[in-house]
Image (spheres, rainbow, N blue to C red):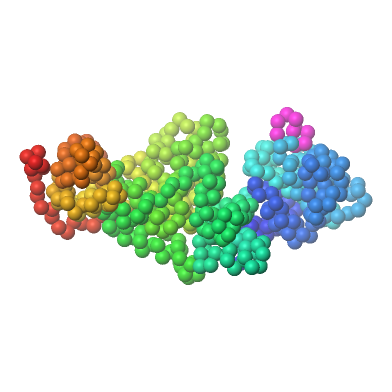
Amino acid sequence: MTTRSQAIANDVAALLRARNPLLWIVTREESRAERYLVEAAVAAGYVPRMWDVAQGISNISGQIENADRADPDSALEEIRTRATGERGVASRGVWIMRDLSPWLSGPSGVATQRRLRNLARLLPGVPLDRAQAVIVISAGGDIPPELAGHATVINWPLPDRQEIADVLDAAVKSLPADMQEKAAPNGSRDAAIDAAVGLSGEEAAACYARSLVQLRKIDPQTVSNEKRRVIARERVLEWYDPLPGGLDMVGGLENLKTWLNARTIAYSPKAREYGLPSPKGVMLVGVPGCGKTLTAKAVSTAWRIPLLRLDLGALKSKYVGESEGNLRKALGVIEAIGRCVVWIDEIEKSLQGATSGSADGGVSADALGAVLSWMQERQGEAFVIATANDVSALPPELMRKGRFDEIWFVDLPNEEERLSVLSASMRSHKRDATGLDSLAIANATEGFTGSEIAALIPDAMFAAFADGGREITTADVLTAALTVAPLSRMADGKIDKLRAWATGRARPASKPSEKAVRPTPLRVLDMA
């Protein structure tokens, strides 16, 4: 099976055969990329050599061939003389240059930049037996505009599952023979690999090594915890703790939860072998406070995969081009991680400038285009959950089939769902609901959002604790309900518009109520 890095290496070999003079490799994994670049150079019939400012020119074994060429200008001159035949001996060479990019910026880099540009113009025309090519390895993809017409930029991918599996096997094999069997992740190999997907090769090896040192075995959870720290360092994604209890802690929304539970099988090893496509994601549109965010957190728990929040607004920067770079980096990390839930909260606010004519210089429009292209063409296993409260601000192209598997409408909870939300809130606060008149509470909270109902329990607990630390009663909850001004009363016009839009455009997340709630008038007299 060809890995992503091998596929890129094959492309590099083809570019070298086609006499491309300058390749710009964007990666922070210098050592791992070099191994594949050397293989590509050899496959294309070139002799690979390395250059850096510390040791000058060296061969692939690390032996220094010419330490006098540590200066970048002298190194480029060496390449020119070999290409023109001034060295006398004809040989085809690929020059992998590690430290060149810093020497090409600023006024002091103008001369070096010109030398490289002249070389890029010269190399395609030299005889085949003296063909030379330059490969620049850089941690950044911003090349000088003067070189953009000569360079082919390649973003080197992070290791995929097969490469991570090789790192895992190497970590286990590095142990003494009598320890290898105990250290191997028996029965959890897939989990140990998935936990490290999204890390660089060096980071994955370090995570496995740390797990071996601490626990004498490969523990997926230890590796996952380390990955959380690495992702936090990138500052383009937020790692969220999943909701304890999973979808059972989400009251109501039975249609949506049934659909999500049915998709759990897509993440099993058998599903991968069968070729079952991974679900793409869902758009949750509806009334604020009715479970959209809670569902995103619960899916992560139910499917046992990481939850990452993509905050498109936080990626924006005051510097030209940096916003787009941050978004590209975030999407690249998501693709590399593989199986995860990507939560985009209130997406209409982040992309509002793309449709309403923003004064942000087109940043919002660029972000929308990047997100749409990624959602349509992505090959990874990330499951996107986007939430929205105002559908009028959503661009139509975001809603079409193919971006998401389904669009769901989340309405105010019905009678049965209010009972379910009340029960879930009691469980989350470790309270016993058997002593409450749940039907009376459900009737009293008609028109409440799920979050408004859930907030009644801690309010009731405060009252009960102040009254001698007793258990909460129905009267405590009903009293708390009297103080709430429901959103449905303050924003009834907006909710009516949402419902009108959802008819025929989105699937209802809730099942119709099958039983009526016993009417219990909410009066202060009844609570005595």
Q: Is residue 500 above or below residue 353?
A: below
Quadrant of the rendering where the N terminus is positioned: bottom right
Residue at (79%, 54%) from the top-left corner?
60
In percent of width and height, residue 89 lies at 91, 53
**Secondary structure mainly formed by the magenta segment:** helix
Q: Quadrant of residue 209?
A: bottom right
In percent of width and height, residue 258 lies at 31, 61
Q: Which residues are magenta?
A: 105-113
Residue at (35%, 40%) from the top-left corner?
393
Image check: 148 left or right of 472?
Answer: right
Q: Does any portion of residue 367 appear in the rendered image? A: yes
In percent of width and height, residue 404 lies at 40, 54
Quadrant of the rendering where the C terminus is positioned: top left
Most foreground residue, 187 or 255: 187
Q: Quadrant of residue 47?
A: bottom right
Disc tally is 0
Most foreground residue, 451 or 146: 451
